[in-house]
Image (cartoon, rainbow, N blue to C red):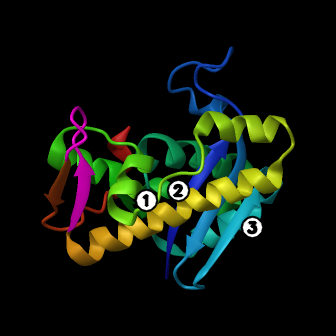
Amino acid sequence: MDTLVFDIETKNFFTDPGVGRDNFGALEISVVGVYSYAQEKYFCYAEDELEKLAELFREAERIIGFSINRYDVPVLNLYFQKLSDRLGLDLFQKERVDLLEEIELVTGKRISLGKLAQANLGAGKTGTGAQAIELYREGKIDELKAYCLKDVELTKGIYELYRERKFLYVPHYITGEIQKIEFMKPSYAKTANLF
């Protein structure tokens, strides 16, 4: 069984006209970046390749990401359900490690992936979600894929530190002062009733 680190990019925002808050069905995926531990390889899939992506996810025991329970999993799961009933794939039934939720459980606060990566890996993000949407709208798909895969790479690096050291450096949400946050053990969410 595989473990996947992933990130999605969308063509639109919740704040776009006709979308609305938490309307996951109105969000359209542009690309999905994935790292497969079983294959030791990065992949990036466009919207028209999601059936191939579903095959990769079907073989995964655990999925990892940053804020995936609130965003990536609900959006991608709807896509997989639309593809076909024959897939029998429900991401909410997979073991999930949401790094942002793990941090929130300890600190009670949210942190951006960029700040977390800078504090732990010495490298930040290469752009923003808004810039990713602009890349899609401008047809710069190769740049969009590179941006998405960079987020996957950062998330993978943070996950490996989280798993191996059992702590992360987290900037304080107001002062920016770096705090060492310790984790007793990873909590793998595996219930369909989180939403």
In this rendering, the answer to whether 176 lies above or below 144 is above
- Quadrant housing residue 131: top right
What residue is pinned by disc 3?
Answer: 52
| Kind of residue sitting beneath label 2 | Asp
C-alpha distance separating marks 3 and 1: 19 Å
| Kind of residue sitting beneath label 3 | Lys
Q: Residue at x 24, y 44 (%)?
A: 104
Label ID, residue 90? 2
Disc 1 + disc 2, Cβ < 8 Å: yes
Along the horizontal axis of the image, is 146 left or right of 90? right
What's drawn in magenta, residue-wise? 167-177
User: Upstream in the sequence, badge 3 or badge 2?
Assistant: 3
Q: Residue at x 58, y 25 (%)?
A: 14
In this rendering, the answer to whether 112 lies above or below 55 is above
C-alpha distance separating marks 3 and 2: 15 Å
Dot 1: within a 10 Å radius of its alpha carbon, few (fewer than 14), some, or many (20 or more) residues? few
What residue is pinned by disc 1?
Answer: 93
- Mark 3, secondary structure of its residue: helix
User: Upstream in the sequence, badge 3 or badge 1?
Assistant: 3
Label ID, residue 103? none
Q: Residue at x 36, y 52 (%)?
A: 116
Residue 3 placement (x, y as % from top left): 48, 75
Total number of numbered labels? 3
Disc 3 + disc 1, Cβ < 8 Å: no
